[in-house]
């Protein structure tokens, strides 16, 4: 028997019942987006051309460790193997209350995408020399997701130009903010 709430033909919500037929209160689901880890250095080192949202095949202790907010995307990347995409180098520390069933912190994790998206990403990485970089790990409505960026590596002079542009924009915003408040230099 299905344990979710069902909408009847008249639009009313049918009560949630367990396997014995008793009514039970529905479990509250997590709503929204809770960011666990973000890869800020990726936006500095790469020009992000496109982003995709992918699920991850995780074990129970990995999910519990992620819910505790413990993960690192430093040195993580996605790679194709046998027509599937895998996430390498992502560090999820062992769950503190885990037993012998605990996971390996840097194991390779399968990414869950639609076949069309996988084929498109594999084609772009093979032909154009682009790479797949994880940008964020987060929970979306209770499901662990990773935001993957299709990226092209930046040269060092590109990074310097970006930093100079950001500093100039910040300076302009600071001066215009003072002028708006009536403070002169």
Image: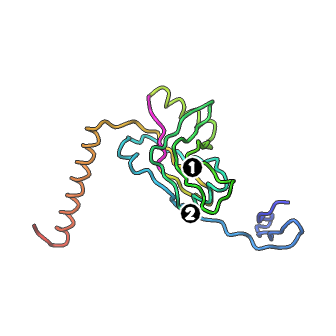
Q: Which residue, as the protein is rendered here, is positioned at the far top?
A: 127
Residue 29 image position (x, y, % from top left): 66, 66
Judged by its main secondary structure, the magenta piece is: strand
Task: State the quadrant of the N terminus.
Answer: bottom right
Residue 172 image position (x, y, % from top left): 20, 58
Name the residue beneath numbered marker 1.
105
Q: Nearer the viewer, residue 120 or 138?
A: 138
Q: Which residues are magenta?
A: 129-135
Q: Residue at x 20, y 69 (%)?
A: 180
Residue 155 picture quarter? top left
Q: Nearer the viewer, residue 59 or 122?
A: 59
**Judging from the image, what secondary structure is the residue with disc 1 in?**
loop
Q: Nearer the viewer, residue 146 or 97?
A: 97
Residue 38 image position (x, y, % from top left): 46, 53
Name the side, left or right, on which 157 lies relative to 127. Answer: left
Label 1 Cα neighbours within 10 Å, binned few <14 / some 14-19 / many ≥20:
some
Eyeballing the image, is 13 above or below 120? below
Residue 132 image position (x, y, % from top left): 48, 38
Name the residue beneath numbered marker 2.
68
Q: Residue at x 63, y 63 (%)?
A: 97
Label 2 Cα neighbours within 10 Å, binned few <14 / some 14-19 / many ≥20:
few
Q: Is residue 9 magenta?
A: no
């Amino acid at each position: 028997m299905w344990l979710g709430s069902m909408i009847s033909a008249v639009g009313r919500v049918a009560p949630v019942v367990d396997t014995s037929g008793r009514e039970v209160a529905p479990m509250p689901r997590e709503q929204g987006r809770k960011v666990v880890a973000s890869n800020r250095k990726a936006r500095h080192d790469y020009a992000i051309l496109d982003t995709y949202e992918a699920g991850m095949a995780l074990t129970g202790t990995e999910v519990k460790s992620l819910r505790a907010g413990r993960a690192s995307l430093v040195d993580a990347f996605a790679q194709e193997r046998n027509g599937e995409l895998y996430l390498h180098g992502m560090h999820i520390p062992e769950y503190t209350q885990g037993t012998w069933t605990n996971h390996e912190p840097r194991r390779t994790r399968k990414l869950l995408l639609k076949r069309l998206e996988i084929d498109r990403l594999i084609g772009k990485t093979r032909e154009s020399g682009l790479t797949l970089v994880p940008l964020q790990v987060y929970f979306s409505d209770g499901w662990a997701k990773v935001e993957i960026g299709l990226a092209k590596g930046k040269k060092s002079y590109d990074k310097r130009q970006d930093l100079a542009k950001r500093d100039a924009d910040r300076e302009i915003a600071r001066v215009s903010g003072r002028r708006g408040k009536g403070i002169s230099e």
